[in-house]
Image (cartoon, rainbow, N blue to C red):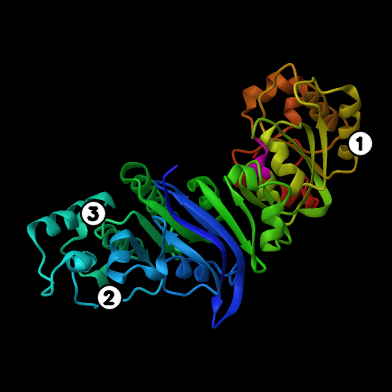
Amino acid sequence: MNTIMSAKGLDVGYENKTVISDINIEAIKGQIICLLGPNGAGKSTILRTLSGLLSPVKGFVEIDGANISRIKQKNIAKKLSLVLTDNVSPSLTTVNEIVAMGRIPYTGFMGKLTENDWNIVKESLEMVGAYDLRERYYSQLSDGEKQKVMIARALVQEPELMILDEPTSHLDIKHKIEIIRVLQRLANEKQITCILSLHDIDIALKGCQTVLLVNNGVIVAQGAPEDIVKNGCIQKLYGISGAKYNELLGSVEFVGNSIADIFVTGGNSTGINIYRALSRNGYGINAGVLHENDTDFQVAKIICSEVVTEIPFEPISNEKVQKAMQFIKYSKCVIDTGFPIGSGNKGNVKILNYALTINKPVLSIRDKSECHKIYGENSEKVIYCDGIFSLLKCIRKILENNDLFSKAV
């Protein structure tokens, strides 16, 4: 492996006061390394120390095997470029002029740019997808456009290493993705190593090759995202309450109401949006029968009060059908999510028909012709909903004791 930067036994902080201790990093060419952690954890302090802006409290940082404290600033600028959150540029300066400033380490005493310098400016703007902005004033750009320009300015330094502090901060999802894709291109096509800090858990874990979890003055864990995101570490890292981070799906789900009024059948991802919609409207939910390898189960186990489950790849047993029926007895209504029906989940059809036989309102997302195949004569009792808005409207009326039963919406 070709190591471009390393930190060994590094303590970082201010005025000999340690903020984060015992940092060990080995950054190889073409790698994207992300620091992830709560506000105030010390991510920016680490980045500023790695870049040479702060002196280590203890330990050292090396670039290409040389201690960064012994490298001249001009030579550091040819190896390493920075994109910090506090970059300030004159308001009447064009994008071309802003990016050209990154060539200063290569210009002579007069700072005159050559044709080659301007070609590098052009190539850098093209690389980040900002060439069409070249004649515009920097102050007139959106936050996402400005971030691309600042990356282009760092890129014209022709660095081997780029350090970025919160490059996606305050950006919408479109620009967050674009910035990460730019960094991935730089890493893959130009072998530039990128070390950055992020607040976006989802983007960090899915877009970066190596992640360092930072909290309480230490590196809690580091490695490939898939290896370190286990056993509730994200939950602990951020001290999340009232919600849970699902490590398999990479999503945060809000914990639902513990008192359940509604029973939801589901499967094959048909229940996820319904669980979320019901929960954010204040309804408590029981769910089932779900196979434990179903994606619906991953969300239901967080949102729902109780979930009746079945072993993966096994047909729903009569025992689980009976258990679900007990929940239905005490529910105010039942929801059919429109799940596909196969040999493994026919038990859920029994559950839905049972609900109708004991006069529980059953609301279905299916169309009438499909319901007729599933419910037979009982299909006339089903309340048809053409989407979640309609579903919520029906539930409100049912819980207000309006007589909607067996009426179509």
Element under disc 3: helix
10 left or right, relative to 139: right
The mark closer to the camera, 3 or 2, is 3
Looking at the image, is 260 positioned above or below residue 349?
A: below
Is residue 17 visible to the viewer in this orientation of the structure?
Answer: yes
Q: Which residue is mark 3?
A: 124
How many residues crowd around disc 2 within 10 Å: few (fewer than 14), some, or many (20 or more)? few
How many residues crowd around disc 3 within 10 Å: few (fewer than 14), some, or many (20 or more)? many
Calculate the distance from the C-alpha at mark 2 to the C-alpha at mark 1: 67 Å
**Disc 1 and disc 3 in contact, CB within 8 angstroms:** no
The mark closer to the camera, 2 or 1, is 2
Calculate the distance from the C-alpha at mark 3 to the C-alpha at mark 2: 18 Å
Looking at the rendering, the stretch of residues picked out in magenta corresponds to 270-274
Nearest to the observer: residue 42 or residue 400:
42
345 left or right, relative to 145: right
Element under disc 1: helix
Q: Residue at x 24, y 78 (%)?
A: 90
Nearest to the observer: residue 349 or residue 162:
162
Amino acid at pointer 2: Ser
Q: How far across and how far down the image is residue 343, in percent?
A: 74, 16
Q: Which residue is mark 2?
A: 89
Amino acid at pointer 1: Gln
Looking at the image, is 378 positioned above or below residue 213?
A: above
Q: Is residue 211 magenta?
A: no
Q: How far across and how far down the image is residue 219, in percent?
A: 63, 60
Q: Quadrant of the C terminus?
A: top right
Q: Which residue is mark 1?
A: 326
Q: Residue at x 20, y 51 (%)?
A: 123
The mark closer to the camera, 1 or 3, is 3
Point out the tag, 1 or 3, that comes first from the N-terminus: 3
Q: Residue at x 27, y 75 (%)?
A: 89
Looking at the image, is 358 positioned above or below residue 403?
A: above
